[in-house]
């Protein structure tokens, strides 16, 4: 499952300096002006950089700095602002994400709570899935970056799972399933996201 750039065009934002106003495409380092071509190049680059995180990981502090480091690594070839907190407000359909000035404080509240839960270590499969779904859903509501939130957040949760002795087979989850689970979580209903994680959770040694 991949979150492609063409879906970013469904975001709306006032005075969006991230977008080339002549093409409507996100400004990018390869200087691509076609959204389909950008989506393809971006997807390929992110796959390679995500694999690189396995052999050359970033510091796993499980806070917003950690999430920023993941995003910076994944998108460094595509966007000059990779790893940077967005400075515009964005929405997608009826979903309005956190005001950009609230991203840092709200993220800190969440990751401080995650730390108090010992980063979900020593939980059984159902317990881990439930709590991981909660934190994933809440961080998605914050949506720290202008683009690429889903891919960076999945990597963040994958690293959280790895530390707890699990892995998550995201490739078994369809994009539509993840979209619906994220919408549900936005409204405070985490059951679908919990189920998706639980059904694709494996002990790390079996990955």
Image (cartoon, grey):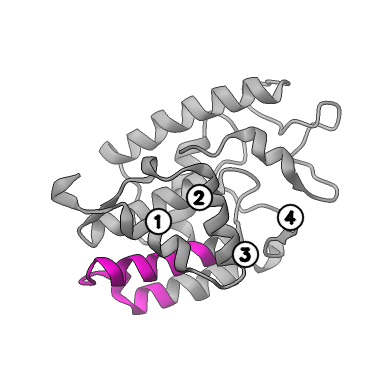
Q: What element carries label 1?
A: helix
Nearer mark to the viewer, of 4 and 2: 2
Nearer mark to the viewer, of 4 and 3: 4
Cα separation between marks 3 and 2: 26 Å
Residue 60 visible, this angle: no
Residue at 70% from the left image edge and 65% from the top image edge = 101
- Residue under pointer 4: 91
How many numbered discs, if any? 4
Start-end of magenta stretch: 113-138
Cα separation between marks 3 and 1: 26 Å
N-terminal of the two: label 4 or label 2?
4
N-terminal of the two: label 3 or label 1?
3
Residue 31 visible, this angle: yes
- Residue under pointer 2: 177
Report the disc number at residue 103.
3
Closest to the observer, 110 or 11: 11
- Residue under pointer 1: 196
């Amino acid at each position: 499952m991949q979150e492609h750039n063409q879906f970013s065009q469904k975001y709306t934002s006032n005075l969006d300096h991230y977008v080339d106003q002549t093409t409507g495409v996100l400004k990018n380092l390869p200087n691509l002006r076609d959204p389909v071509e950008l989506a393809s190049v971006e997807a390929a680059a992110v796959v390679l950089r995500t694999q690189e995180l396995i052999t050359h990981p970033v510091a796993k502090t499980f806070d917003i700095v950690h999430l920023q480091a993941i995003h910076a690594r994944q998108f460094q070839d595509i966007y000059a602002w990779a790893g940077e907190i967005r400075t515009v407000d964005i929405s997608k359909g009826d979903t309005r994400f956190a005001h950009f000035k609230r991203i840092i404080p709200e993220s800190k509240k969440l990751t401080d709570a995650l730390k108090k839960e010992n980063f979900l270590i020593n939980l059984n499969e159902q317990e881990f899935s439930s709590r991981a779904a909660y934190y994933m859903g809440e961080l998605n509501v914050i949506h720290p970056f202008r683009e690429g939130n889903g891919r960076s957040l999945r990597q963040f949760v994958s690293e959280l799972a790895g530390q707890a002795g699990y892995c998550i087979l995201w490739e078994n989850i369809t994009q539509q399933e993840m979209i619906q689970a994220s919408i549900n979580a936005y409204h405070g209903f985490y059951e679908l996201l919990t189920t998706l994680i639980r059904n694709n959770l494996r002990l790390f040694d079996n990955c």
